[in-house]
Amino acid sequence: MKLCDFVIPADIDEARARLRELGDAAFPTAGGVSLHFLRFAEPKTAVDLTRLGLSGISRDNGRFTIGATTPVCDLQKHVAEGWVLDRVARRFVTQQIRNISTLGGNICRVFWWSDFPVALLALDASVAVRGESETVLSAEEFLARPLKLLKPGTLVVAIDIPAVESGAGFGYGKETRVGSSFSLATAAACVVVEGNRIKQARVAAGASLSMPQLLPAVGEKLAGETADREAIEKAVATGTEGLAWKGREGMSDPYAAELSRIIIADAITDAVAEART
Ligand SMILES: Cc1cc2nc3c(=O)[nH]c(=O)nc-3n(C[C@H](O)[C@H](O)[C@H](O)COP(=O)(O)OP(=O)(O)OC[C@H]3O[C@@H](n4cnc5c(N)ncnc54)[C@H](O)[C@@H]3O)c2cc1C
């Protein structure tokens, strides 16, 4: 995509004003990595979002709030009890792309290979969107139609996730051909275990589906089951029936389905193991 100008607003109000003024001629730019994949007929003006004070991670009341322009490398480096996005960040492409790509940019234009939407769906994250007023949407609502919600001058300002605390666990699984290539199958799971049983589970998958999506049927099948591999595989097999799997990079669709079921079961198994420790 061709850029013809670059503006660097100093705060959110100025950024929103410039974006409204420029309308469709603006390209709100965080890391700018998606420019590699996008094609527009007309050149655009880049409106830089990285100096609006929207970068950083804070914790309050058992939840983490992550500013929209926080780079993936900061998610990778962050250490705190209950913090799990470092595991997703470590599987995210290459260090160079982790250094410039932002969490907001990764969820505002979702590609089939996108990692963070899968994790945020499983974590039941919420997304704060600033237009004339601030609206907080569930990750599920936001990710169903990000481009429709983000009218000119509307920005994602923060993402909120729970800390994964005692009795709960998180797992993230991803398959790629080589470390630096696109995701071929991704899965995230967040579970609560009580004794030997899974009390509650939220599971999401992507890459070998048309877009990242929550798999509520898998969560329902897991609830109340014994927390062992056999029960997990059975819940994944029955809970993913009928999904339209898509093979990438030479994989057939049935191969993608089989691979994805293994990656999903692995993510749930990891989450259960963590919940038990
Ligand atoms: C070779 C390659 C392989 C990749 N593989 C993967 C992969 O396997 N998994 C993965 O997850 N990612 C992968 N990526 C990166 C991914 O596809 C995205 O392009 C990247 O995460 C975008 O982040 P960004 O901060 O650069 O966003 P930008 O490119 O700056 O923005 C992306 C979109 O979101 C909008 N936007 C950004 N921030 C905001 C905001 N705060 N409010 C409103 N709108 C906003 C922009 O206008 C734009 O439309 C890969 C990239 C490359 C180059």
Image: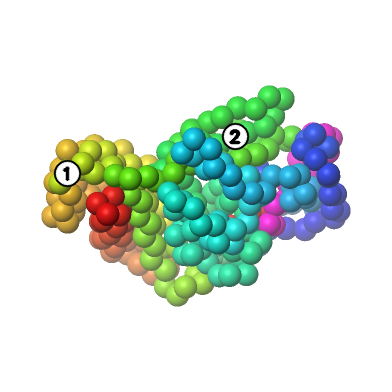
What percent of the width, then of the height, locates residue 269? 25, 56
Based on the picture, tell me whether residue 23 belongs to the magenta stretch. yes
**Camera-nearest residue between 95 and 57:** 57
The answer, for residue 243, to whether it is visible in the render is: no
**Residue 134: image location, x then y, percent:** 65, 27
Per the rendered image, the range of residues in magenta is 17-32
- Frontmost residue, 179 versus 258: 179
Taking depth in this image into account, of 9 and 109 the one nearest to the observer is 9
Instruction: State the residue at coordinates (62%, 69%).
Output: 96
What secondary structure is marked by label 1? loop
Q: Which residue is drawn at 36% across and 51% down?
A: 170
Q: Is residue 8 left or right of residue 125?
A: right
181 or 78: which is nearer to us? 78
Residue at x 64% of width, y 39% of height: 156
Residue to which mark 2 is pinned: 128
- Total count of labels: 2
Residue wearing tag 1: 195
First reached walking from the N terminus: tag 1 or tag 2: 2
Q: Can residue 107 be seen in this view?
A: yes
Number of other residues with Cα within 10 Å of mark 1, as a class: few under 14, some 14 to 19, many 20 or more: few
Amino acid type indicated by mark 1: Gly
Residue 159 quadrant: top right
> As shown in the figure, which amino acid type bears the numbered disc 2?
Ala
Q: Is residue 212 magenta?
A: no
Residue at x 41%, y 52% (from the top left corner) = 206
Q: Is residue 201 left or right of residue 20?
A: left
